[in-house]
């Protein structure tokens, strides 16, 4: 039985309780054929000292949405997903509103995955481009 879009998003947000995602107020907000979108508020909790979004918070948003995308779009009954490497190119600063991370697969292999993650602001300006590689490892029985 396939879950509804709302049920998948609710489940993803529920498992984020008591994690970094909850601390940064990252929430999964949309998904469709081959993509997942998360958002994070830009406020003093994620600022660097000069009052703009910290690149580390951006990378945490990107890794969160990319890992969840692997979780949602892979058959994970017998495996779990871990991040291997993340890169982030920050193109523009932002100091208020929300940033949105859209993760799409560039490669969806049985063992390794590569995701493209575009970070945009409320006005659809490109803030950062990230790449995340993940690995699927067998669950211990």
Image (cartoon, rainbow, N blue to C red):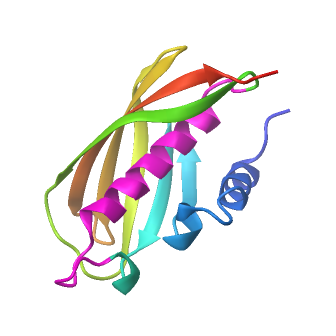
Examine the image and state in which quarter residue 16 appears: bottom right
- Is 54 inside the magenta-drawn segment? yes
Q: Main secondary structure of the magenta part?
A: helix
Examine the image and state in which quarter residue 97 appears: bottom left
Judged left or right of residue 2, residue 115 is: left
Examine the image and state in which quarter residue 23 appears: bottom right
Residue at image location 66% in from the left, 60% down from the top? 13
Judged left or right of residue 104, residue 27 is: right
**Which image quarter holds the C terminus?**
top right
**Farthest front residue in view:** 140
Residue 28 appears in the picture as rendered: yes
Q: Position of residue 79 (x, y in %)?
A: 67, 24
Judged left or right of residue 49, residue 38 is: right
Q: Is residue 107 above or below residue 26?
A: above
Residue at image location 17% in from the left, 70% down from the top? 93
Residue at image location 13% in from the left, 58% down from the top? 91
| Closer to the camera in the image, 85 or 93 | 85
Q: Position of residue 44 (x, y in %)?
A: 35, 85
Q: Is residue 52 above or below residue 17?
A: below
Residue at image location 69% in from the left, 27% down from the top? 76
Residue 33 appears in the picture as rendered: no
Q: Is residue 106 above or below residue 31?
A: above
Q: Is residue 124 above or below residue 105?
A: below
Q: Position of residue 63 (x, y in %)?
A: 43, 47
**Which image quarter holds the N terminus?**
top right
Q: Which residues are magenta?
A: 47-76
| Closer to the camera in the image, 99 or 125 | 99
| Closer to the camera in the image, 7 or 74 | 74
- Is 86 inside the magenta-drawn segment? no
Q: How many marks?
A: 0
């Amino acid at each position: 039985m396939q879950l509804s879009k709302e049920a998948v998003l609710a489940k993803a947000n529920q498992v984020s309780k008591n994690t970094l995602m909850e601390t940064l107020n990252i929430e999964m907000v949309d998904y469709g054929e081959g993509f997942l979108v998360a958002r994070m508020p830009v406020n003093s909790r994620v600022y660097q000292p000069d009052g703009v979004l910290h690149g580390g918070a951006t990378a945490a948003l990107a890794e969160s949405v990319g890992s969840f995308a692997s979780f949602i779009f892979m058959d994970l009954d017998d495996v779990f997903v871990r991040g291997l490497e993340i890169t982030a190119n920050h193109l523009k600063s932002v100091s208020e509103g929300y940033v949105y991370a859209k993760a799409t697969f560039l490669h969806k292999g049985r063992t390794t995955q590569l995701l493209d993650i575009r970070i945009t602001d409320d006005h659809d300006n490109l803030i950062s481009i990230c790449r995340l590689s993940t690995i699927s490892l067998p669950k211990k029985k």
